[in-house]
Image (tube, grey):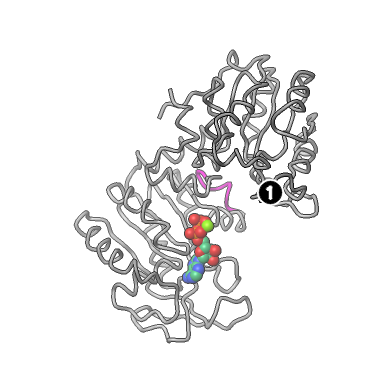
Amino acid sequence: MALRIPEAKDVTRKKVLVRVDFNVPIKDGMVMDDTRIKAHLETLRFLKENGSFITLISHLGRPKEGRDPEFSLKPVAEYLSSLTGWKVNFVPDCIGEAVEEAVALQLQDEILVLENVRFYKEETKNDPSFAEKLAKPFEVFVMDAFSAAHRAHASTRGVADYLKSFAGFLIKKEIESLSVVRDNPTHPYVLILGGAKVSDKIGVIENLLPKVDHILIGGGMAYTFLKAKGHGIGKSLCEEDKIEYANELISLSQDKGVKIHLPLDCVVAPEAKADVSTIVIDTETSIPDDMMGLDIGPKTIKAFCEVIKEAKTIFWNGPMGVFELEPFRSGTEKMAIAVADVAKKGGYAVVGGGDTAAAVNMFGLSDQMTHVSTGGGASLEFMEGKMLPGIEPLLD
Ligand code: ADP
Ligand code: MG
């Protein structure tokens, strides 16, 4: 996939509109997590070093009707300034005179942050005349919001029809890393899947099945597979309408020589609560009717770690249990440690999915992975083999 990456000549002294993802958690006007902001700094430094006039555009949350101050990007503009020491000015609109004036008067060392693009309903409709208005004050578009690239919105896709467009360095890193695990893995390749639902992961499974050697299945989705194999799963998460699919997948993977590993034991409790008492049950023995499986057990952890240890390539999406609650965290944490070990030894270990990335972050292991994708839905759609609408205009 040949992305168009900007060179100095493309951006020097140019008025550059950069689509970032500044959709960060904000509480009482304070940015609570700056991971997404920091992810764009490489692109912003490149543009600054090459003398661009930089303007940033982003969405924040899902404002329902027009300008809701709760969803203003002003606190993010202020945060960016304090994080970097750069001169950052907030513009209280994203189209029209206010923006045109600010861009016309912009100093080279000044970064403009526009107001939440979702204050206009035309944004999510990818309205062409709105996209044209977004583009109007600028000469170049740099798309860097990988996590929004699966959406064909005016600021992620439409605006590229009106400006010379390039991929930013975050998008470059995301596409390069995810392409390795999607298209060019070194074997053995271990796919680790967990999280809540089988239905969310079918696209990824189907696209990767011809490439992988092992699939480890944990999390809530494992119970649909266990039920398909005839195990009693109590009141664990189960998608009845996916049981047949689970059986088909098990036999298809046998034909293809892919080994599917299901939990051997699990941590069960009457409900997903922080202060419940838990027990470990072998999956061969039925889970009692009033109990649910909420994490993989120690035997499973050991078996999964054995497989992970041999891997040269890993893609991991979906926590092994309800890691948000301490009693059900261990499976996900032990997997994270094992996956990070593979990366440390030179293997290629990529983590995708919003909750999985949050878990790895919680364990302080993000830096030790080869790559932790910033794109939740976008990374999954990419792994499914789909062309992302925000990426398409950036290809040569
Ligand atoms: P990602 O965002 O990484 O793609 P998902 O959204 O698919 O991951 O799944 C994450 C959620 O799955 C977490 O909130 C976690 O609590 C939940 N989960 C994991 N295991 C179980 C389980 N056994 N039962 C119920 N929910 C689970
Ligand atoms: Mg999720």
Q: Is residue 334 visible?
A: no
Q: Residue furthest left?
A: 255
Picture coordinates of residue 89, whole percent (x, y)? 79, 31
- The foreground one among 269 and 167 is 167
The N terminus - image quarter: top left
Picture coordinates of residue 40, whole percent (x, y)? 63, 35
In the image, what residue occupies the spot 38% across and 51% down?
204
Q: Which image quadrant is residue 202 in? A: bottom left
Q: Is residue 228 visible?
A: yes
The C terminus - image quarter: top left
Provide the secondary structure element on which disc 1 rests. loop
- The foreground one among 273 and 124 is 124
Q: Is residue 368 magenta?
A: yes
Image position of 176 with respect to 61: above or below: above
Q: Which image quadrant is residue 275 in? A: bottom right
Instruction: Quickly name the residue at label 1.
Output: 65
The answer to whether the beta carbon of the residue marked 1 is less than 8 Å from any atom of ligand 2 is: no
Q: Which image quadrant is residue 164 in? A: top right
Image position of 76 with respect to 172: above or below: below
In the image, what residue occupies the spot 45% across and 53% down?
316
* Span of residues in magenta: 365-372
